[in-house]
Image (cartoon, coloured by chain):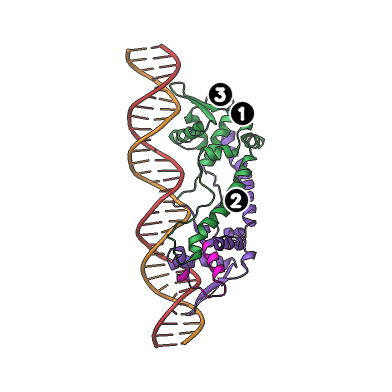
Chain colours: A green, B purple, C red, D orange
DNA sequence: ATAACTGTTACTATAATAGTCACAGAATAA
DNA sequence: TTATTCTGTGACTATTATAGTAACAGTTAT
């Protein structure tokens, strides 16, 4: 499949909203920045909204804006909001009863991969949206 | 697309080889344990071989075995060997020159995601094949 | 020579994701 | 109250990374 880029698109959208400050923003405006269709933006926005990262208004003056300060939004929040896939997946297969490895490798792998997933998530916690925005503006 | 499971299949194969000790092992035997075709196993095996994790013999008595002790193989070695995809990918899109975010978000994101990738890889270094094998046998 | 394996290429099938379209529902403004 | 213009969402197609298979040349033991 195509790689999952929802996460990076979500960060892009949030950074754009942070930069626009108090201005109301329509999905079409964001779509222009991200270079995709408004519809796609709205679908991502819906997830961010459910996760409480943005707020939206429907109707003629429809718009969206950050629900809280950029410094209070971590990349882990975004990661969870878009429900991005785990770093690793384990293959599924029929266990061969005669083979110890075949029977127990799955559990052993899960244990190990849980650790690495935790490490990744811990790293995401360390990075705030505000930092991203600051980097964007610096350049 | 389907998720990338090459990594977990590679670990499965290596764990199986570790358990079999000095016995010569054919790709068909591994295929039975992993529950896939010998051809698929051989392709993974080829990568592991290029990375120096296993050694193989061609010809009638063809076989494969670990190139070094399981405790000297880390999951990071395996990760690199199979050339597994990065945890995150960044969306590509045409930069909108009028938009600061659109122009610089990519660099900012790359910087952030490099950090998390490093964290993930550091975590993989900590886990050896020997540990996986030990977990498999314990159960 | 023959048999039996690996290494590799070429192919098809699958499935996750991207991306688009269309429309109902909602709020504003005339 | 009607027209307008936005969001939210369901239904769809297109794309593409990956899984998985088939086939065969090359290699080695017997």
Q: Is residue A1 above or below residue B67?
A: above
Cα separation, mark 2 vs mark 3, equals: 42 Å
Which residue is disc 2 drawn over? A115
Mark 3: give few (<14), some (14-19) or many (20+) Cα within 10 Å. Answer: few
Mark 1: give few (<14), some (14-19) or many (20+) Cα within 10 Å. Answer: few
Cα separation, mark 1 vs mark 3, equals: 14 Å
Decide whether the magenta segment is chiefly helix, strand or loop. Answer: helix
Which residue lies at the image location 45% right of the left edge and 56% below the top edge? A92
Instruction: Give the magenta-colored segment's residue range.
Output: B12-29
Which residue lies at the image location 60% right of the left edge and 70% below the top edge? B67
Q: Is residue A9 above or below residue B118?
A: above
Q: Which of label 1 and label 2 is nearer to you?
A: 2
Return the residue nearer the eye: A34 or A58: A58
Mark positioned earlier in the residue sequence (1 or 2): 1
Which residue is disc 3 drawn over? A23
Return the residue nearer the eye: B105 or A47: A47
């Amino acid at each position: 499949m195509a790689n999952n880029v929802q996460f990076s698109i979500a960060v892009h959208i949030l950074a754009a909203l942070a930069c626009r400050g108090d201005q109301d923003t329509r999905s079409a405006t964001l779509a222009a920045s991200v270079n995709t269709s408004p519809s796609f933006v709205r679908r991502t926005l819906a997830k961010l909204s459910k996760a409480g990262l943005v707020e939206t208004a429907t109707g003629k003056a429809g718009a969206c804006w950050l629900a809280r300060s950029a410094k209070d939004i971590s990349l882990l929040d975004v990661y969870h909001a878009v429900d991005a896939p785990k770093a690793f997946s384990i293959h599924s297969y029929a266990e061969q009863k005669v083979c110890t490895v075949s029977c127990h490798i799955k559990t052993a792998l899960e244990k190990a991969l849980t650790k690495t997933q935790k490490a990744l998530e811990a790293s995401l916690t360390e990075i705030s949206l505000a930092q991203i925005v600051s980097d964007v503006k610096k350049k």
